[in-house]
Amino acid sequence: MMLLVKVNRIMAPIMKLHLGDIVQLKKTHPCGSDQWEVIRLGNDIKARCTGCGRVMMMRRSRFVRLIRKHIAPVEEQVSES
């Protein structure tokens, strides 16, 4: 899901990411996989390669630009009272 946010008078896309999401990046990892699991969110994003388990960390703005598509978004858990 993409949201548009006004940043410095320019409408910039913001992608909603959640812990555990699987995303496909534009470039493939040397192991041959292009799918990554999001394991940390914030200003920086940490992701783990689903092929070999390698962990990388980069700025959110750069990570969002590298995303080709959302493979498996985590479903929202509804707490029952």
Image (cartoon, rainbow, N blue to C red):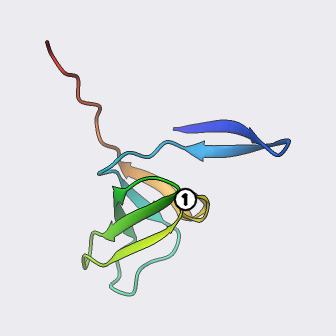
Where 11 sits versus 59, above or below?
A: above
Residue at 40 percent across and 71 percent down: it is 34
| For residue 10, above or below residue 31 | above
Q: Amino acid at mark 1?
A: Arg
**Residue 67 on image: x %, y %:** 52, 60
Name the spot of residue 75 as percent of width and height, x first. Answer: 28, 35
Outermost residue, left side: 81
Q: Residue drawn at (40%, 65%), measured in percent from left and top?
A: 46
Q: Residue reaching furthest right?
A: 9
Q: Is residue 11 left or right of residue 37?
A: right
Quadrant containing the C terminus is: top left
Identify the residue position indicated by label 1 in the image: 60
The quadrant where residue 79 appears = top left
74 to the left or right of 46: left
Q: Position of residue 51 (x, y in %)?
A: 26, 75
Q: Residue at x 49, y 42 (%)?
A: 16
